Image (spheres, grey):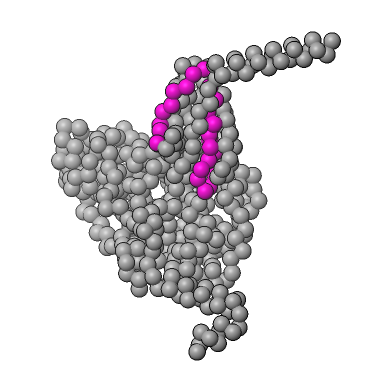
């Protein structure tokens, strides 16, 4: 009777009903096989053959990471900027370095750096081992003289033992400091988020709004053009049209026209924890970020051809944000290590 | 007079065609899933002869920007979308490293013999 009634009203009504039914079925159903294949978290953490993770290396690396004596002021540790209480970042627009100097770029989270093919906003280093020493010796950041640091660490018996245990016979040197910190950083990986539970078949793990947001993410909003894969990064470099940006970014490493003002695609894992956003911390909220992309960015030189106005409705923006928030997992408690002292 | 020119032009054209087929070959390297692909297989190295052309075809649903800063052959093909391709002639012997500027994990070593 019901179907007879709507049949009488023409095929358009049927079409609409079909769309509504399929929409609601979709929202209640799980991901496609392709989604699961593309976005499921890997079970293993990649690690280089010459620096396999061991408990001794991770323990040493964690101590070094939290030790302010690695800086020339003995006041700034890696964790000062990469603060686990703030999503392994600092909640500042741009970082604060040696002598309270304000730096030009925001502090990227170290979450999932194990999976990144390039480190730093401009990708100037490929491995965590090469990245780890950079901020320690950079004049604007921890401003440490490496030779002086080695003398300081060698004078601390606890560190001598820890280095020997982690890297027998190799001694305390820049290479072993970097390898230990890299080993610890590789343990900082995202925990299971509502999106992961949904991918694994728990249809109730994400709200219908978040599921719709995921569809938008892959289609109309085309976020996947850059934020692709389980870590939501293509390991690529793009100019997203930030108005007034004068930072050359990747172009300073590779002088190719398309790289002017281009920066590495950051992970979106735990993204709700890592405000403010963009390489210069321009946006304080995810809403501002979505508005930026909805406008297609500012028409700046080198703007990525992937950037186009999206014409998202208010509801679609809300759905996208619901999806982005579903990428934040339960925050694991991080213990602060006791550090070896001179006596 | 016009007959004379026509036959000369024909000869020249034949010469160019014959010369082209004898010397230069064209290789197609696709960009698929952010990798360089040839004949369906991912590649990180390709060997070509002096004068050969490599046709870089984007088959991903987003832009690529193929370039090389190698002294052997410096070029920047710019950004181009799915379905488009751009060609480079490798006219000297040696090695060139080709990358995508946008996705730098894409790396291709070109050996020109």
Residue located 46% across and 42% down the image: B32
For the question of whether residue A75 can be seen, the reply is no
A166, above or below B23, in the image:
below
B96, above or below B67, in the image:
above
A111 is within the stretch colored magenta:
no
Residue at the farthest right position? B1
Residue A133, horizontal then vertical, whole percent: 35, 39
Stretch in magenta: B41-69
Residue A230, horizontal then vertical, whole percent: 38, 54
For the question of whether residue B58 can be seen, the reply is yes
Dominant SS type (magenta): strand
Q: How many marks?
A: 0
Name the residue nearer the viewer: B20 or A6: A6
Residue located 57% across and 71% down the image: A314
B52 is within the stretch colored magenta:
yes
Name the residue nearer the viewer: A325 or A249: A325
Name the residue nearer the viewer: A13 or A202: A13
Residue located 48% across and 39% down the image: B31
Residue A207, horizontal then vertical, whole percent: 41, 73
């Amino acid at each position: 009777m019901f179907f007879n009634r709507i049949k009488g009203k023409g095929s358009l009504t049927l079409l609409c009903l079909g769309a509504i039914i399929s929409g609601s079925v979709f929202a209640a159903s799980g991901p496609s096989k392709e989604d699961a294949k593309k976005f499921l978290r890997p079970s293993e953490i990649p690690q280089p053959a010459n620096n396999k993770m061991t408990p001794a290396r991770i323990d040493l690396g964690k101590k070094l990471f939290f030790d302010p004596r690695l800086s020339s002021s003995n006041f700034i540790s890696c964790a000062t900027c990469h603060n686990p209480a703030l999503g392994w970042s600092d909640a500042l627009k741009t970082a604060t370095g040696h002598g309270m100097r304000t730096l030009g770029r925001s502090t990227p989270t170290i979450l999932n750096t194990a999976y990144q093919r390039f480190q730093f906003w401009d990708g100037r280093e490929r491995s965590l081992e090469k990245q780890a020493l950079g901020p320690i010796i950079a004049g604007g950041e921890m401003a440490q003289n490496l030779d002086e640091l080695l003398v300081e660490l060698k004078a601390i018996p606890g560190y001598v033992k820890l280095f020997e245990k982690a890297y027998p016979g190799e001694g305390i040197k820049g290479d072993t400091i970097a390898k230990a910190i890299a080993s610890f950083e590789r343990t900082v990986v995202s925990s299971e988020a509502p999106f992961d539970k949904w991918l694994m078949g728990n249809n109730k793990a994400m709200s219908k709004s978040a599921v719709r947001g995921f569809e938008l993410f892959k289609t109309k909003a085309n976020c996947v053009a850059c934020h692709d894969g389980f870590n939501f990064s293509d390991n690529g470099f793009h100019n997203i049209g930030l108005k007034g940006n004068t930072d050359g970014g990747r172009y300073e490493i590779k002088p190719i026209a398309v790289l002017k003002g281009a920066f590495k695609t950051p992970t979106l894992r735990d993204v709700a924890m890592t405000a403010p956003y963009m390489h210069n911390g321009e946006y304080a909220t995810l809403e501002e970020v979505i508005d930026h992309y909805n406008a297609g960015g500012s028409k700046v030189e080198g703007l990525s051809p992937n950037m186009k106005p999206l014409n998202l409705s208010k509801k679609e923006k809300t759905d996208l944000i619901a999806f982005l928030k579903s990428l934040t997992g339960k925050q694991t408690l991080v213990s602060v290590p006791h550090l070896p002292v001179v006596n | 007079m016009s007959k004379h020119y026509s036959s000369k032009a024909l000869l020249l054209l034949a010469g160019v065609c014959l010369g082209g087929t004898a010397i230069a070959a064209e290789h197609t390297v696709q960009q698929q899933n952010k990798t360089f692909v040839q004949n369906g297989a991912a590649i990180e190295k390709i060997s070509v002869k002096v004068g050969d052309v490599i046709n870089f075809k984007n088959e991903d649903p987003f832009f690529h920007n193929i370039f090389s800063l190698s002294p052997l052959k410096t070029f920047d093909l710019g950004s181009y979308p799915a379905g488009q391709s751009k060609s480079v002639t490798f006219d000297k012997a040696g090695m060139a490293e080709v990358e995508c500027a946008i996705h730098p994990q894409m790396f291709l070593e070109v050996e020109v013999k």
